[in-house]
Amino acid sequence: MSRPNPIFAQALGHLNDRQREHIEAAFALLEHSIEPVHRQYLPAMEDASSRTSLEDLLRRTGRTLVTVDGGLHWTSGFDDTIAAGLTAAGWQPLTTLERAVLTLVLVHSVAIPRSEEQLNNDTWASSHPTAAAEILRHSKLPSTEARLALSRLAAVGLIRMVRSGDSEGGYVPGPQLQRLTPAARERLQEQLILAAAPDHPLASAIRERRSQHPKGQPL
């Protein structure tokens, strides 16, 4: 018989069997579901004691609860303190090429439409897919390498391919971006502004604020 995970035992040992089952099920759904989970499938969220224990369990694993639409859907993401520590330690799962391609997708499918008031200010959902040809043209990268980067980014859920009528369609943000905490989402949105419109007054304001408070502003 396998030994129980000590993290689960410490966080859930004081609960009854039903509460533990609900929390363990919620933890698995939040961590492993591709898309955010509807609240109706998370009974652990309905009980204050169970929710507190779920949050404690996530915290012990470096994770935190993230709401996508005000509480109807939920997912989990890296705790901001843990993310800052990983960044400070130089942890970066994406290559420079992959980061460049991801930036192009986000700029063309989110930042530019948002600047033209075609998107809500706080969403990664986009009806403006970025065609692969557009990415290849602006990236100035070898076609094979850029396409491999697109495939890898799609495989890990950072972008996804959508079709648009009879056209070849293109790429939009993927579900993994919905795991960002509000603070992480704000930082990324600011980075998109700096990348898409570096001469805009808002970009100047961001640079000014960061120059005054350089710590805690990972780039």
Image (cartoon, grey):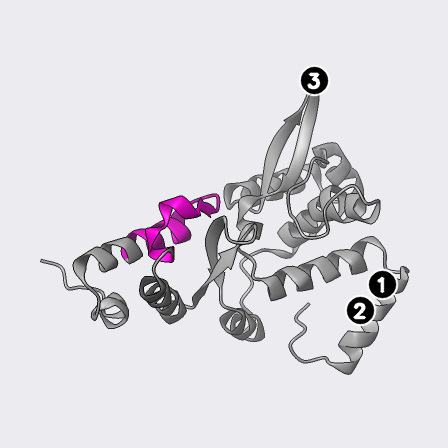
Q: Which x, y percent locates residue 40?
A: 39, 45
Q: Which residue is mark 3?
A: 166
User: Between disc 1 and disc 3, whose residue precedes?
Assistant: 3
Tell me the amino acid under the disc marked 1: Leu
Q: Nearer the viewer, residue 8 or 158?
A: 8
Q: Which mark is residue 206?
A: 2
Instruction: Work out how far the residue at label 2 is from the one at label 3, CA to CA, in angstroms.
Output: 40 Å
User: What residue does disc 1 label?
Assistant: 202
* Marks 2,3: beta carbons within 8 A: no
For the point 65% across and 37% down, which residue is it? 171
Evaluate if marks 1 and 2 touch, with contact meaning CB atoms under 8 Å apart: yes
Compared with residue 105, is residue 51 higher up or lower down, i.e. above or below? Answer: below
In percent of the image, x 61 and y 44: which residue is there? 149
Residue at x-position 51% and y-position 46% = 156
Part of the protein shown in magenta: 24-45
Res. 140 visible in picture: no
Q: Residue 14 in the image: state x and y as whole percent.
A: 21, 71
Q: Which amino acid type is marked by label 3?
A: Asp
Whole-angstrom CA distance, mark 1 to mark 3, is 37 Å
